[in-house]
Structure formats: C-alpha cells, structure tokens
Image: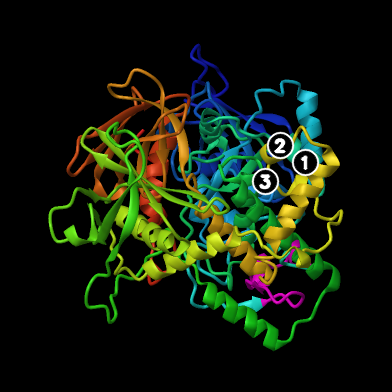
Amino acid sequence: MALDGIRMPDGCYADGTWELKMHVTDLNRDVSLRVTGEIHIGGVMLKLVEKLDVKKDWSDHALWWEKKKTWLLKTHWTLDKYGIQADARLLFTPQHKLLRLQLPNMKHMRVKVNFSDRVFKAVSDICKTFNIRHPEELSLLRKPRDPKKKKKKLEEAEEETLELEGPLLTPGSGSIYSSPGLYSKTMTPTYDSRDGSPLSPTSAWFGDSPLSEGNPSILAVSQPITSPDIVVKMYKPQSLLDKAKINQGWLDSSRSLMEQDVKENEVLLLRFKYHSFFDLNPKYDAIRVNQLYEQAKWAILLEEIECTEEEMMMFAALQYHINKLSIMSSDNHMNNSEKEIDEVDAALSDLEITLEGGKTSNTLGDITSIPELADYVKVFKPKKLTLKGYKQYWCTFKDITISCYKSREEAHGTPAHQMNLRGCEVTPDVNISGQKFNIKLLIPVADGMNEIWLRCDTEKQYAQWMAACRLASKGKTMADSSYNLEVQNILSFLKMQHMNPDPQIIEPITTDINPECLVSPRYLKKYKNKQPGFVRDLISARILEAHQNVAQMSLIEAKMRFIQAWQSLPEFGITHFLAKFQGGKKDELIGITYNRLIRMDAGTGDAIKTWRFSNMKQWNVNWEIKMVTVEFADEPSLAFICAEVDCKVVHEFIGGYIFLSTRAKDQNESLDEEMFYKLTSGWV
C-alpha cells in the first residue's frame, strides 16, 4: 500500500496501524511492532517471536502490561478489548520466575514460581512440590522489617547468617494425586528406615527434583538451632502493635505476585496463615508436622506468643528431646524392625489429636443423657466491688450453663448466679508448682463482656471444667465426642509441666543443652544479675528435669505434643490488626481466630467483646472508606476501619476461616478454588 509508511499526527499510520512497544526481558531488547487494534494477543506474541528470530522455547512467556499491572493471558482477546493503545509499553517475560522462600523452619529454598498465577494457586503448587497437604492453610508473607535496624549492611549481614540455599525447585504438574490439598484415600504411608517415623510417599511428589535424591524427607527433619546468636538477631515483636504490623505483610491470595510488586529473587515467607489444621495425620504429614512444629518453636522463642515459665521449660524440654532424636536418627541411620514400626503406628493411633478445623462427630453412641458436672468451685468477679476475693459455691454445669448455689443443699432452688457460656472467651491461668488452677471467663453481654474467674482444687477437676467451658463456648455440650479427648489432652499438657521430685535420675549437665537456644530471651534475662555460667547450669537443670516427663516419647509424638501444647496457649491462633471501631475514639485491636472476632485493648490485649462467626449473617466492605461491616443474627452490627493495613487483608482472613470450616474428609479431593475467591476476594 502506498500510504502505509506515512505516519499521521496522532502516531498512527495512514493504513490504520500503529507501533506497539515491547521489551523482551530475556534478551534485554526493545522491539516495536506495527499492529492494529483488531489483532489478538496470541497474534502479537507470534509476530514478536518471528521478528526476534531467536531459537529458544518461548512457551512460558507472556505479555505483562506495566502501567496497568496486569497479565495479558487471554490470548484470544484483541488489543482493543484490553484497551491497549500506542502509549502502552508491554513486557515479554517468563511467567515462572525465581523466588527465595523462607520456610517455617527459617531455612531458605530457591523455587521457581508462576508469577502470573493467583497467589492461592501458586502456594498450592509450592506445597505440592514440598509435599505439604492442605495448602489452603498457608500463604506468603513479606518479610517484616525491624524498625531498630536502619543500616542496610546490618540487615544484609543478618540475612547471610540465616541463609541456607536449597536446591532449585520447580513446582510440577501432572502429579499422581489430583490435589495435594485434601485427604487422599489412595495415599499409602511409608516409614523412614532410620527412625521409624512415618513419611509421605515423597518420591511420587518430588519426581526428578533434587529433593528426591538421597533423602526425600529433608523437609521432615528438624534442624537444631546451632548458635544463640541466631535467636538474638531475629526480629522480635515487642508489643501487640508490632504483631499487628507483621500481619500487614500478607499477600492478596486472589492476585498474582507480579500484580503485588513482588520482584524476581525476592525473599518471601511461607507460613501457616490460618490456624485451623485439618486432618493432621502423622502417617501422611511428616513434612507438614515438622514445618508446623518449626513455626510453633520460633513463635515461642521469638516471643510472638506468651507462655508461663513452666510452659517455657516444657517447650524447651520437648525441643531438646526432638533435637536429640533428630541427631541420633541422622547419625546412626538406624534400621528399625517391622515390630518397632508397628509400635510407633500404634502409639500414633493412641495419640490421635482432634485439631480445630476438623469435623468432630456429634454421635452420642450409647449416651442417653447429656453429662453434667457438679462440685464445689471458687468463683471471683474481679470487676464487682462487692466480692473482695474468691467465694466458694456449689456449681453445676449443665448443657452450656453454669449455675452457682450457696451450698449443695440449695441446688434444687434458685441459683445465686447463672452463666451461659456460648460465645465466651476461655483463658487458662495455671501455675503447677503453686497448685493454681484458674479458668478465666469473659462472657458476652449486651454492653460488653462480664469477667468471671473459676478456681479449681485439683488437676482433674480443672481438666473437666476447662474442657466443658471450651466446648460450651462453641455451643457444644459434654455429650460431644471430643469432650473426653479434650480432658485427656489437658491432663497430658499439665503432666508435661510437672517437675520430677527425684533428682537422682537427672542426666549430668553437658554442653549439648545450649539453654540459650531452647528458651526465649525473656527467661534468660530473668537471671541477669547472676553469673552467666550459673544461669546456664540452672536453666539446663530445669530443662533436664522437665525432660523426664517427655523422655520416652518418639520423635513424631514429641513434635505432635509440641504442636498440641502450642495450641493450648491462651493467645494461640489470634491474628491482630490495628483498627478504629465505629463510635470509638482511639485505635484498638481486632483479633481474628478460626471461629470468632475479638475487640481488644491495644495496650493490654484484654478482650472487650467477642463475636462468633456462627452468629454472623454477612460481612461487607466499603472499599472507598476502607470500612468492614459485619452483621449478626441477634446483636448489633459491627463496623471498623482498618488502620495501617488494607482492609482486603482482614476481609480475606474472615472469608478464609469460613472457607476452611466447610472442609470435610468425605468430600472429593480437590479444593473449590472459586468458592475460596468468592469468600475472600471481595468486589473491588
């Protein structure tokens, strides 16, 4: 055509074509193509590859529109349909790029991840590569910055100290399993030949990746902390506000990595985001159990979650035991007999732990009436001036209600006090050595929360009443099948904290204990006025004393006990965000857990009001003013504005927990991704 080379004032050519500018990242070359608005994206890429005339596999490449931060993945769409004009600049770049993932055990792996997939899908692929079931419980988090460390050199030095580059992994497709996410009836448990601990069929998952060479269970092995300096240099949140700031870094699960400005080779944290661990089965989940144990261990060492000194010594003893068994199994390469493997399997069956998120059976079996508790219990109302201390009542626990009578003989009359525990906050306050077994209850009322403390006399009484309170807070009675298991778990948790009175069987203190690597800095500072050597021996002796309660446990059982004890801590599973509530004058905290929202005091962390998801009708977000509104069935609606964090993050936590609550073992083995997006992505 004679006029096709003549350029018009608007930048287009006389034949209606115009120049589209593109940058090829692999070659670092700028290329211009003459196109029209009717050409589809696939045609643009074809013309570009022909013009480059470079022999290579371009199949993983796609077009990225920098200005609009969007991938042009619908190759049948035209440039006009996407709204691309001559002022656009497109990148022709690979969809799979390198990421440096920090796993829950604080070690780094280089992984090739699809930067064009939604984060939810990318995490699923990563978990499939690592053989971690239920990837919906995990997500990616940006690394928190320590405000005290402003010098870049110091940060770089810290990262070098912690860096342990693993092999390059590419999440594969075409696994023999339809999904790594849910329970698979086709999975066959296998066992590590060295220590008898059960492992998943990792070779089927890893395929030809470097992880399958030699020892495919590398991620299932706990690696002890080698130096106290590592703990010292790690970022520790100093307050609840610091914890809330960490949660600003969660990536949006419904958008891709590129859309969220994640760069190639950037460090992201892979973490268990939702504290609702479904079907945690040591038989199939060796890697998942180990990474959960590692996340729990670091949360305790870095003081991200509070625990008492007795609990800290119990955690230290379990950690010491796990370290010892991990090193022994690595050094000795023991070959266990089938009998030993069967014993481990039997022990694991006895250990069957029902974790929040799983569906518990409500079958009553041969129970014809709902069990009740009746005993003398001391009751204290700290906010009521009329009661100066604990007062003993004859208390009966029926269904989800506690009734308090002045004496046993008056139990058929009108109670002096009555408490309905549905939706209440239940917090343990226990000191084993001081024989203190308290249960703190925050019971919702119209204008906030009533605080009631119960004091039990014995461990058994405490375990029974604590288990009943926890079930009642969820609207369940003691007829629920999980009640007896909950009682046993509480008793087991208390038993592990006992100090053994027989000092003769304490093993001699050796240098392999390293108490600085087993307890958090706070408990080391407690003895700061004493000689360092004395402190080391004192804490080591306490750890060894506590170790006697766990010394007979197998490796996998010790990890499961550690996770279970972590879940028993009062602050477990609460994700904090800074928020301003409608009608409130100051910033407060909103805490989100697997089953409720909690309004909290930003200074003390005390619960002010609790709302259960089970009572929730709907929740909405006003994206313009960033306000989250939640409506309930039988109480006033809740509205708050998120401070210092996009309300999308809070919206996703609420929707994510509701999505997880719908899981069941008998459903098919694939995740309903669309349902997850529907509940979490909102309408932006």
On whether residue 210 falls in the magenta region, the answer is: yes
Residue 209 visible: no
Q: Residue at point 53% right, 65% down?
A: 492
Q: Nearer the viewer, residue 537 or 633?
A: 537
Q: Amino acid at mark 3?
A: Leu
The residue singled out by tag 3 in the image is 101
Q: Amino acid at mark 2?
A: Met
Q: Mark 3: which secondary structure? A: strand
| x then y, percent, for residue 257 | 56, 39
Q: Amino acid at mark 1?
A: Ile
Q: Residue at point 76% right, 21% down?
A: 151
| x then y, percent, for residue 323 | 75, 60
Direction top: furthest residue: 9
Question: Would you place residue 277 above or below residue 225 in this image?
Answer: below
- For label 1, count other residues whose C-alpha is less than 10 Å away and answer few (under 14), some (14-19) or many (20+): few
Cα distance, mark 3 to mark 1?
18 Å
The magenta region covers 191-213
The residue singled out by tag 1 in the image is 230
Quadrant into which the C terminus falls: top left
Cα distance, mark 2 to mark 3?
17 Å
Is 75 situated left or right of 199 in this image? left
Is 155 situated left or right of 51 in this image? right
